[in-house]
Amino acid sequence: MESYDLGNDSTRNASTGRVRTLRRVLDSPIRAFFRLLLPLSGMLLCAPVVAETADFPYDESADATLEVAAAVEQARSTDRLLLLNFGANWCPDCRVFARAITRPSVAQAVLRDFVTVKIDIGDWDKHPELVEAWGNPIEGGIPSIVVARPDGKILLTTRAGQLSKARNMSDEEFIALFEHLATLRDKAYIDE
């Protein structure tokens, strides 16, 4: 089947003599397929970006020093303990831990007794002053937490990777952990 160009985006089939415009060719089922595919591909390409953003709980641009200072004041005014969560977005267990404390069933147990701050440690190079000030909780790995009273007395620091299996913990295990951590307040006052 030979065809020749008539100009103006038209072709004439040499054997049938039919003139076929480029628009008519593009209105074929293939064109319809691509009309559907293009918007879908755009949505599919954007979806991972949205999912990844939602999956990164540690604010890499946050001024953690200011956030900790505000949390200390809030803990003081609400008579709650301070829970500092040291982690990074590249760490799967850190992301699981940070997400777990925002799930409704776990968040209720956390917010009742703690004021929380997520501190991004980057690639072990961010906020070294906070890491040092709060007893180097990341030396054994992340995620790591510090539980402290509003006056700065540290009640517990996870320094031996105790939370390194956070991805395997159930909501019930997280709740039990935070309920246990909340009892540290009373023990701390008895020990003094």
Image (cartoon, helix red, strand yellow):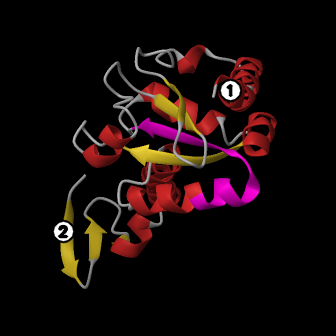
Q: Which residue occupies 60% across, 49% down? A: 150
Q: Is residue 144 above or below residue 51?
A: above
Quadrant in the picture for residue 183: top right
127 lies left or right of 110? left
* Magenta span includes 72: no
Q: Which residue occupies 49% across, 46% down? A: 118
23 lies left or right of 170? left
Secondary structure beneath label 1: helix
Label 2 amino acid?
Tyr
Query: Dot 1, crowdedness within 10 Å: few (<14), some or many (≥20)?
Result: some
* Magenta span includes 74: yes
The one nearer the camera, 86 or 105, is 86
Give percent across and percent down for residue 169: 64, 17
What are the residue bounds of the magenta stretch?
73-87
Sequence-earlier tag: 2 or 1: 2
What residue did someone put label 2 on? Answer: 4
Closest to the camera, between mark 2 and mark 1, is 1
Label placed on residue 184: 1
Q: Is residue 20 above or below residue 76?
A: below
Secondary structure beneath label 2: strand
Residue 95 visible to the viewer: yes
Give percent across and percent down for residue 139: 31, 23
